[in-house]
Amino acid sequence: MALSFGSRFKGNARIVGVAIALFALEITFVADWPFKLIVSIESEQKKYHYTPRSDFHVSVDRLVYLLVEVQSDENQGDRYQMLLQAACAARLGRLSYNNPFIVVALYIENSGRVTRYFFFST
């Protein structure tokens, strides 16, 4: 099945074995994440809402497991944005599951070179 940019695929799956679990898989192209982050700045005593956005991400039960960014500017600012978002997702996953949580991030440069990052929180 071919998915166009901006489309979403949602499905349910079962893991059969000793335990049966249901989860919602979401694959999203160029879209907002399924949750917002709240950023607190102590010096200003303010809180800001931030909705992460990535070129491609895969989430299960609204938690992001895979991030992909494609270079869109020469200084690769989107790479650093992706790295910060992946770190937040790993920490959120750890807090949600109370178990170690791993997020994989891929950055694709204009030359075609792909760099893989693993983020985890224990």
Image (cartoon, rainbow, N blue to C red):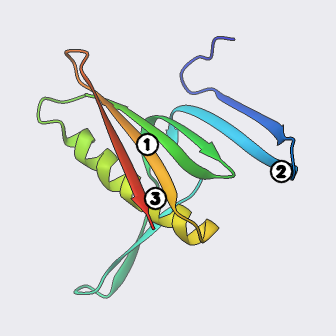
Separation of marks 3 and 2 at Cα, in angstroms: 21 Å
* Residue drawn at the location 61% of the way across and 68% of the way down: 96
Pointer 3 residue: 90
* Residue drawn at the location 46% of the way across and 49% of the way down: 103
Question: In the image, residue 58 lies at what x, y percent?
Answer: 57, 38
- Identify residue type, mark 2: Ala
Separation of marks 2 and 1 at Cα, in angstroms: 22 Å
Assign a secondary structure to mark 1.
Answer: strand
Among the 4 quarters of the image, the one containing residue 38? bottom left
- Identify residue type, mark 3: Ala
* Residue drawn at the location 58% of the way across and 17% of the way down: 4
Q: Which of marks 3 and 2 is in front?
A: 2
Is disc 2 surrounded by few (<14), some (14 to 19) or many (20+) residues within 10 Å?
A: few
Separation of marks 3 and 1 at Cα, in angstroms: 9 Å
Q: Left or right? Give the position of 7 relative to 68.
A: right
Pointer 1 residue: 104
- Where is 102 relative to 117, above or below? below
Which badge, 2 or 1, is on the more N-terminal residue? 2
Question: In the image, residue 84 lies at what x, y percent?
Answer: 31, 55
- Where is 74 relative to 3, above or below? below
* Residue drawn at the location 24% of the way across and 20% of the way down: 113
Image label count: 3
Among the 4 quarters of the image, the one containing residue 48? bottom left
Query: Are discs 3 and 1 less than 8 Å apart at CB?
Result: no
Pointer 2 residue: 21
